[in-house]
C-alpha cells in the first residue's frame, strides 16, 4: 500500500528531457509559392532555405501550411519551413508549426527581404517593427508581439518612384546573381550559428558582414 502511494505522488520521470526543447529551432523563410515567384527578390527567404537544403542534401516535404525539411547539426534540430500561405498570411504557418513542434519564440528565426539594406547586407535583430513588410505584419499580428528574431537580407531600394512592387517581385540582376552564392553561404552560416552560438553572439559575428 505504501509503495502505491509513493509511486502516485512521485510519478516516473518522463523520458523527454526538457532540455531537448531548447535544442529545437524553427527557421522560417518568407516567400510566395509558385514558379512565378521563385527567383524574385521577395523570395529570398525561400532561396536561403533551398540553398541550405541543397548543401546538406535535405528534402522538403509538403505538409500543412508549408514545405518542411529537418536538419540535424551539432545536437540541434532545425525545422526549416517555407510557408505555403503566401506572404500576407505567413503568421498562420509560423504559429501552427511553433505549436505543433513545441518551439519557443526565442528559438524562432524569420528570414525576410529588406529594402532598407544594401544588396546582400545581413542584419539580425531580436525585435522591431514590420517596416511595411506584409509577411512580418501578419506574423506580428498572429504572435501578438514584435519581439521575435528576424534575419533581414538586403535587396536595396534601387527602384524609381512608384515601382516598389515591381522591384520586389522582380528577378535578380545578372550582377546580383553572380554575388548571391557567397551571400547564401554566409546566410547558412548565420542560421547554424543562431542555433549553436545563440542570438547575441550571432549578431556580433554577422551583422553588417
Image (cartoon, grey):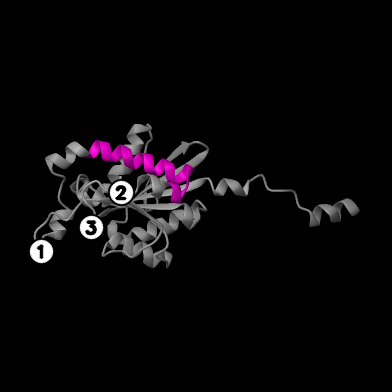
- Of residues 30 and 123, the one nearer the viewer is 123
Q: Position of residue 209 (x, y in %)?
A: 30, 44
Q: Residues within 10 Å of mark 2 (few under 14, many from 20)?
A: few
207 left or right of 102? left
Residue at 38% across, 35% down: 58
Tag 2 near tag 1, CB within 8 Å: no
SS category of the residue bearing label 2: loop
Q: Quick one: label 2 or label 1, which is nearer the N terminus?
A: 1
Determine which residue is flagged by label 3. Answer: 116
Q: Nearer the viewer, mark 2 or mark 3?
A: 2
Q: Residues within 10 Å of mark 1 (few under 14, many from 20)?
A: few
Tag 1 near tag 3, CB within 8 Å: no
Q: Quick one: label 2 or label 3, which is nearer the N terminus?
A: 3
Residue at 42% across, 68% down: 144
**Extreme right residue here?**
1
SS category of the residue bearing label 1: loop
Mark drawn on residue 162:
1
Residue at 50% across, 36% down: 74
- Of residues 160 and 40, the one nearer the viewer is 160
Determine which residue is flagged by label 2. Answer: 208
Residue at 45% across, 51% down: 200
Tag 2 near tag 3, CB within 8 Å: no
SS category of the residue bearing label 3: loop
Between the C-alphas of marks 2 and 1, the distance is: 28 Å
Q: Is residue 1 visible?
A: no
Magenta-colored stretch includes residue 15 = no
Q: Position of residue 91 (x, y in %)?
A: 37, 60
Q: Nearer the viewer, mark 1 or mark 3?
A: 3
Q: Position of residue 59 (x, y in %)?
A: 37, 36
Q: Quick one: label 1 or label 3, which is nearer the N terminus?
A: 3
Which residues are the magenta region?
A: 180-201
Amino acid at each position: 500500500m505504501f509503495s502505491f502511494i509513493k509511486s502516485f505522488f512521485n510519478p516516473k520521470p518522463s523520458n523527454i528531457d526538457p532540455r531537448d526543447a531548447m535544442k529545437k529551432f524553427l527557421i522560417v523563410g518568407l516567400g510566395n509559392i509558385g514558379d512565378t515567384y521563385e527567383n524574385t527578390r521577395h523570395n529570398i527567404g525561400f532561396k536561403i532555405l533551398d540553398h541550405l537544403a541543397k548543401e546538406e542534401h535535405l528534402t522538403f516535404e509538403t505538409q500543412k501550411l508549408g514545405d518542411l525539411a529537418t536538419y540535424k547539426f551539432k545536437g540541434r534540430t532545425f525545422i526549416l519551413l517555407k510557408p505555403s500561405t503566401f506572404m500576407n498570411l505567413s503568421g498562420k504557418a509560423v504559429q501552427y508549426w511553433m505549436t505543433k513542434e513545441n518551439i519557443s519564440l526565442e528559438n524562432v528565426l524569420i528570414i525576410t527581404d529588406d529594402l532598407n539594406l544594401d544588396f546582400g547586407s545581413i542584419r539580425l535583430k531580436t525585435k522591431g517593427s514590420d517596416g511595411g513588410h506584409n509577411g512580418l505584419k501578419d506574423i506580428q499580428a498572429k504572435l501578438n508581439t514584435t519581439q521575435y528574431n528576424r534575419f533581414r537580407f538586403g535587396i536595396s531600394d534601387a527602384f524609381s518612384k512608384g515601382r516598389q512592387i515591381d522591384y520586389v517581385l522582380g528577378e535578380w540582376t545578372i550582377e546580383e546573381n553572380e554575388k548571391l552564392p557567397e551571400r547564401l553561404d554566409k546566410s547558412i552560416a548565420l542560421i547554424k550559428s543562431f542555433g549553436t552560438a545563440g542570438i547575441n553572439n550571432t549578431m556580433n559575428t554577422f551583422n553588417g558582414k
